[in-house]
Image (spheres, grey):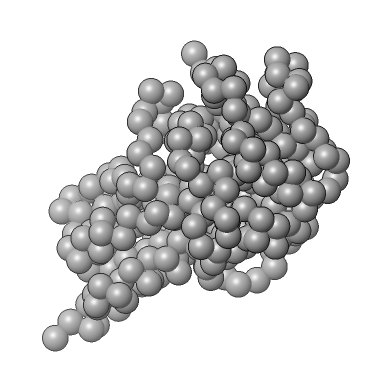
């Protein structure tokens, strides 16, 4: 039976497991105990919880100090408050000295942030973190993988950023499914798999899998790859899959600038591959608030939009053929 519901609960469970194994694990909060579902951790390990109140910059500074003393602090609050409000502290106090601080950002993307509107819809966080050297960046696609990813970043020596949601996530993987940091995972190869490469990251993966099934039903060969680690990026696997495909589509609940789409574009360009690329995501606009699934549909991330992007990229491939 599933022992948790949603990515926040999965993170909280993983923290309990890690704390039991390693006395260096501590939790730093910014008035976010309830938001991060960390009540059980605080009850069991009250001496290992540091809640600084609504002061994210201070939370990162405290975490830097704890890490410099040999502890492994997890800073857990809303994604945008870590990556924007405390960006300088993340960069200068943690990433620059390479301190062993783990950042966990909730409400990543439109799907996770519909309650409070644009101020709590964090669609820039991955781009911000990708621009700071040395930070491992992980975007699991469901609760079970969040639990595994939390354990994985705890084993990394150095700063890490884990993006999670808000409780609306779809269950895609079993609890025993493995998670390999830094490795692209091929989830489906429909038909020949050589017409369209769909690359996805995060909580939108369920829509990508549905789009792949429908495209395969139209007679197209589709490969689906999950890119759950944006740093270190599995550039070799991306280039290898893109090389055998006629067109590439990236899908992410994030601004198309700076996230997965940008990362894949860089790989394709640097590998010298002449492959049409379509980027499905937030098209460099500020979204409105609304119901989670409807928001993705309204901003061009519906299953039909993914399919249309794939067909469009494939058409460009055919028109470019000699």
Q: Is residue 109 left or right of residue 275?
A: right
Seen from the viewer's position, the closer of residues 192 and 187 is 187
Q: Is residue 155 left or right of residue 276?
A: right
Q: Which residue is drawn at 43% across and 55% down?
A: 231
In this view, 98 is above or below 50: below
Q: Which residue is drawn at 70% across and 62% down?
A: 88
Residue 298 is situated, as x and y percent measured from the top left of the image, at 62, 60
Residue 244 visible within the image? yes
Quarter of the image with the C terminus is: bottom left
Q: Which residue is drawn at 66% across and 56% down?
A: 93
In this view, 17 is above or below 260: above
Q: Is residue 164 left or right of residue 28?
A: left
Figure disc tally: 0
Residue 267 is situated, as x and y percent measured from the top left of the image, at 33, 68
Residue 129 is situated, as x and y percent measured from the top left of the image, at 57, 59
Q: Which residue lies furthest to the bottom in this view?
A: 322
Residue 217 visible within the image? no
Q: Residue at x 66, y 30 (%)?
A: 26
Residue 264 is situated, as x and y percent measured from the top left of the image, at 38, 66
């Amino acid at each position: 039976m599933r022992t948790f519901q949603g990515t926040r609960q999965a993170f909280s469970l993983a923290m309990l497991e890690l704390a039991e194994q390693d006395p260096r694990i501590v939790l730093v909060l910014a008035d976010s105990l309830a938001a991060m579902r960390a009540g059980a951790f605080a009850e069991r390990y009250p001496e290992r919880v540091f809640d600084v109140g609504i002061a994210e910059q201070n939370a990162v500074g405290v975490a830097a100090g704890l890490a410099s003393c040999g502890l492994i602090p997890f800073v857990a609050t809303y994604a945008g408050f870590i990556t924007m409000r405390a960006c300088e502290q993340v960069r200068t106090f943690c990433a620059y000295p390479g301190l062993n601080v783990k950042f966990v950002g909730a409400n990543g993307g439109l799907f996770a942030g519909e309650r409070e509107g644009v101020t709590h819809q964090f669609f820039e966080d991955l781009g911000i973190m990708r621009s700071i050297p040395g930070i491992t960046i992980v975007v699991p696609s469901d609760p079970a993988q969040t639990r595994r990813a939390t354990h994985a970043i705890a084993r990394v020596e150095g700063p890490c950023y884990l993006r999670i949601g808000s409780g609306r996530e779809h269950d895609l993987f079993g609890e025993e499914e493995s998670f390999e940091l830094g490795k692209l995972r091929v989830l489906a190869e429909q038909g020949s798999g050589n017409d369209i490469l769909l690359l996805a990251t995060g909580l939108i993966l369920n829509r990508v899998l549905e789009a792949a099934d429908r495209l395969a039903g139209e007679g197209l060969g589709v490969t689906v790859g999950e890119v759950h680690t944006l740093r270190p990026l599995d550039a070799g696997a991306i280039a290898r899959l893109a090389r055998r495909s006629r067109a590439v589509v990236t899908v992410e609940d994030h601004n198309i600038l700076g996230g997965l789409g940008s990362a894949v574009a860089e790989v394709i360009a640097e590998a010298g591959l002449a492959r049409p690329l379509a980027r499905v995501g937030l098209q460099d606009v500020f979204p409105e608030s609304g119901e989670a699934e409807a928001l993705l549909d309204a901003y061009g991330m519906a299953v039909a939009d993914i399919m249309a992007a794939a067909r469009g990229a494939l058409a460009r491939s055919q028109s470019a053929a000699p």
